[in-house]
Amino acid sequence: MAQIPLPLSFDKRFSFQNYFADNSSYIEQQLTALFDETGEPLVGIWGGPDSGKTHLLNACAHYARFCSIPFHLFDAEQLVEADSSGFSEFPSGSVIGVDNLDLLAGNRAWEAQFYDLINRVKSAQLRFIFSLTRAPRDTGFKLPDLKSRLGWGLLIALHNVDDRQLEVILQKRASMLGLDLSKEVINFLLSHYSRKLSDQMQLLHRLDHVSMSTQRKITIPLVRENC
């Protein structure tokens, strides 16, 4: 088995400032409270693809770095092939983050590690934030005590964005990049390309690069030429 991989470097594109949802203020308040030790020390966020789970975990890393708080961020996809035995060696006061935790469901060695980790959270040694693709009760974890412990803290359900929200997010993210997207361009992007939020964000960053390198305003012809 491979050794535990190093924690992920956070993606600087993601922050609380560019996370947009109807309840984004509430989510930011709860997640920053985890780091400020004014809220729940155990937080789970769950939702389907493109619901913002990875964005929020990277936003947590961004916030932790700003506040000089030790934060160790992992993706369960990194961990599933690794030897779990070294995962418990975090110093007291650390915050642990794991994206896609349910990828480890059914792996008894890893389930035992997270059972012990949550016990350390309850004894105020660590803080823990994790993401799942579904509610803890619906995951495939085999260790009953782990499944119940995942629900001990605060659980936040995320929802996929609808068409109205997607349009608003595109406009706001473009504005933060200094781009002026007309209503016509936004409608063109949404009607001619994938409506997945992550795909639209990739398009937006590509158009930002093209606009800067060519010194051209983003128009429908520019989109057609480069996307």
Image (cartoon, grey):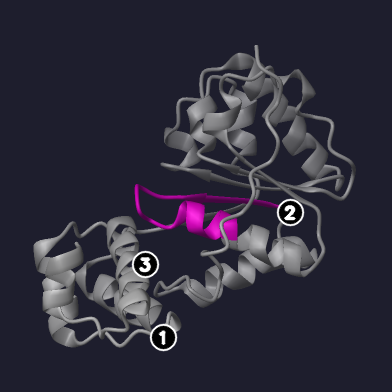
Query: Can residue 29 be spotted in the picture?
Result: yes
> Within 10 Å of the Cα at label 1, are there few (<14), some (14-19), or many (20+) other Cα atoms?
few
Q: Secondary structure at mark 3?
A: helix
> Does the magenta segment cover residue 45?
yes
Say which label, 2 or 1, has the lower sequence index.
2
Front one among 122 and 219 = 219
Extent of the magenta region? 41-58
Kindly indicate the quadrant of the structure image that contains residue 188: bottom left
Amino acid found under the numbered disc labelled 3: His
Query: Is residue 202 shown left or right of residue 9?
Result: left
Query: Is residue 66 shown left or right of residue 43?
Result: right
Question: How far from the left and from the top, in percent, is residue 18?
Answer: 48, 73
> Within 10 Å of the Cα at label 3, are there few (<14), some (14-19), or many (20+) other Cα atoms?
some
Q: Secondary structure at mark 1?
A: loop
Structural distance between the alpha carbons of marks 2 and 3? 35 Å
Residue behind mark 2: 41
Q: Give the mark toward the camera: 2 or 3.
A: 3
Residue at the far front: name it. 214
